[in-house]
């Protein structure tokens, strides 16, 4: 059921049904056998996790909820403590072997520490952390942090002292929503389907903050596309007029034409036809984009290659295939400017390359950084690219002058807001009324940067404003000059899909 290597590499400790064994790797023979007790007659105990220390002490967790400590030399049990109400599924021993962390079906994460006594070194229960709502399946130690994960799909990093708990959701940073501005439509990407929605409208005007407006036209689902079994959608895109849908799975690229009639009515007529004759050179991509004119599709391959396709009802054609030189790793980011002339790609090793899509050549390379970019976008009306990196730095780069902008240099001394956040920037957009205002967002917060104030180096004005009112914010962008759209995934929607938790009796229930 489980095993653990000794630091010498010559011994292995294994756990199975009712038994813990120690094996000599050189001979393949078992040298110790230890029997685990039973909580009920005729009910066998399963050893789910085991670890062996350098001093030949074995730590095990079993289906009774017991943490047991064994002497591997003598084959005897030193200590057994019932720390959980149900199965213990995982444990980890810290590098200095002074602490052991355990957890399982009972999601409490319990720590055992080495203590010195007159009878020798013993283990005692100390810290208890409540980090998860469901079964904890994995524990590890990374530096000063304890890293845990399980059925609730959250990754938790914790330490004490000081008391720090960081939790990261299972939502990916890849764009899962795309706005078709001229058609007032929204494309939502799910793992196995796409949904195209017509957004509602209102005739009311907000008089105060947080005021809810009544919709004069309700939201309406226009199209739903499902992929075949065992396939997963990796990326998607929609044209500004919502007449073209394109998506990629891990094995193929698909293009669809959407025809809409009677869009002003409550129930418009929508037909979807697949374009079957794509160029043979087309490959599955990790990022997709449609130019503002809706005439070209830009496809970024995981290898870093960039393909530009001409959209046609009968026979789409491959206009150009960029094969970047000197790229040290694969790519994961793609951004196309507002007129479709330039495209920028970002790699995992911190490289950003800008291409000229009209002349089919490389425009420039941004200075390489140690950390990979997490989001990037072109400023409307300017030849400037805004890039956010994993180390929470944000830079503006002028692709015409091929140098950093003045405001990005001034932002270095004022980026405390980004560094204080536990999340990286996941998206970049701009104020539809003023392109000098850059809007960035992470999992929970919005950041508003005024580049005009930064360029003027005005110290008495606030250049970065923050708004923390979201949880799991996956998309934020403008629809028109009057409206912006924010898409948030409710934590309850994730919990409702999970299996039941361990029932625990609480006071008053």
Image (cartoon, grey):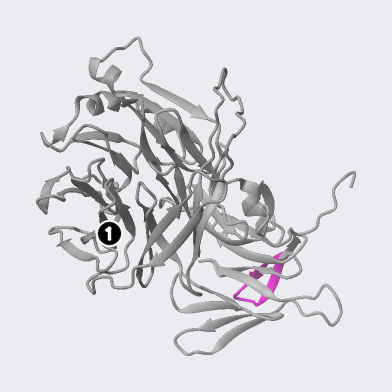
Taking the magenta stretch, the answer to whether it contains residue 69 is yes
Q: Position of residue 18 (x, y in %)?
A: 72, 80
Furthest-top residue in this view: 460
Nearest the viewer among 97 and 4 is 4
Residue 109 seen from this side? no
- Is 60 positioned to the left or the right of 182 in the image? right
- Is 180 positioned to the left or the right of 223 in the image? left
Nearest the viewer among 336 and 349 is 336
Q: Position of residue 134 (x, y in %)?
A: 67, 57
Residue drawn at 57 percent across, 68 percent down: 51
Residue drawn at 22 percent across, 41 percent down: 339
Q: Position of residue 47 (x, y in %)?
A: 67, 74
Whether residue 442 is situated above or below residue 306 in the rendered picture: above
Taking the magenta stretch, the answer to whether it contains residue 451 is no
Q: Residues within 10 Å of mark 1 (few under 14, many from 20)?
A: many
- Residues rendered magenta in the picture: 67-78
Nearest the viewer among 79 and 111 is 111
- Is 367 positioned to the left or the right of 229 in the image? left
Q: Which secondary structure type mostly characterizes the magenta part of the structure?
A: strand
Whether residue 76 is situated above or below residue 287 in the rendered picture: below
Tell me the quarter of the picture where residue 471 sits: top right
Residue drawn at 60 percent across, 57 percent down: 100
Q: Position of residue 90 (x, y in %)?
A: 61, 64
Residue with the mark numbered 1: 299
């Amino acid at each position: 059921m489980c095993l653990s290597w000794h630091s010498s590499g010559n011994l292995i400790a294994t756990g199975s049904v009712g038994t813990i064994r120690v094996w000599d790797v050189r001979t393949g023979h078992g040298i110790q056998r230890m029997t685990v007790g039973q909580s009920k007659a005729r009910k066998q105990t399963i050893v789910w996790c085991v670890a062996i220390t350098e001093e030949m002490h074995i730590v095990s967790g079993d289906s009774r909820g017991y943490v047991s400590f064994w002497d591997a030399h003598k084959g005897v049990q030193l200590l057994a403590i019932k720390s959980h109400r149900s199965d213990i599924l995982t444990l980890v021993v810290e590098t200095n072997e002074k602490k052991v962390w355990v957890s399982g079906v009972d999601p409490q994460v319990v720590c055992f520490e080495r203590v010195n006594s007159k009878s020798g070194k013993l283990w005692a229960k100390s810290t208890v952390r409540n980090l998860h709502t469901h079964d904890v399946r994995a524990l590890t130690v990374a530096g000063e942090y304890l890293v845990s994960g399980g059925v609730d799909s959250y990754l938790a990093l914790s330490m004490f002292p000081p008391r720090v708990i960081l939790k990261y959701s299972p939502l990916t940073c890849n764009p899962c929503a795309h706005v078709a501005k001229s058609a007032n439509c929204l494309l939502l990407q799910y793992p196995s389907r796409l949904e195209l929605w017509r957004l509602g409208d209102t005739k009311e005007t907000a008089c105060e903050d947080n005021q809810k407006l009544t919709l004069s036209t309700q939201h309406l689902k226009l199209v739903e596309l499902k992929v075949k079994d065992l396939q997963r959608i990796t990326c998607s895109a929609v044209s500004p007029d919502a007449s073209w849908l394109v998506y990629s799975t891990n094995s193929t690229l698909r293009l669809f034409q959407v025809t809409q009639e009677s869009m002003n009515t409550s129930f418009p007529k929508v037909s979807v036809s697949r374009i079957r004759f794509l160029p043979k050179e087309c490959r599955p991509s990790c990022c997709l984009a449609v130019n503002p004119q809706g005439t070209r599709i830009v496809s970024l391959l995981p290898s870093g290659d960039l393909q530009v396709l001409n959209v046609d009802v009968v026979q789409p054609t491959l206009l150009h295939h960029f094969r970047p030189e000197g790229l040290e790793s694969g790519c994961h980011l793609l951004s196309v400017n507002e007129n479709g002339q330039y495209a920028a790609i970002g790699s995992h090793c911190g490289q950003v390359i800008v291409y000229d899509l009209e002349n089919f050549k490389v425009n420039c390379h941004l200075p390489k950084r140690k950390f990979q970019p997490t989001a990037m976008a072109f400023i409307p009306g300017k030849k400037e690219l805004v890039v956010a990196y994993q180390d929470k730095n944000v830079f503006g780069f002028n692709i015409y002058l091929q140098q950093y902008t003045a405001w990005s240099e001034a932002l270095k001394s004022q980026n405390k807001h980004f560094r204080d956040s536990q999340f990286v920037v996941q998206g970049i957009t701009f104020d539809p009324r003023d392109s000098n205002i850059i809007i960035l967002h992470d999992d929970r917060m919005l950041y508003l940067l005024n580049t005009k104030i930064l360029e003027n180096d005005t110290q008495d004005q606030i250049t970065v404003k923050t708004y923390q009112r979201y949880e799991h914010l996956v998309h934020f962008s403008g629809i028109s000059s009057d409206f912006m759209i924010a898409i948030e995934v409710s934590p309850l929607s994730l919990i409702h899909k999970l299996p039941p938790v361990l029932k625990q009796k609480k006071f008053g229930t």
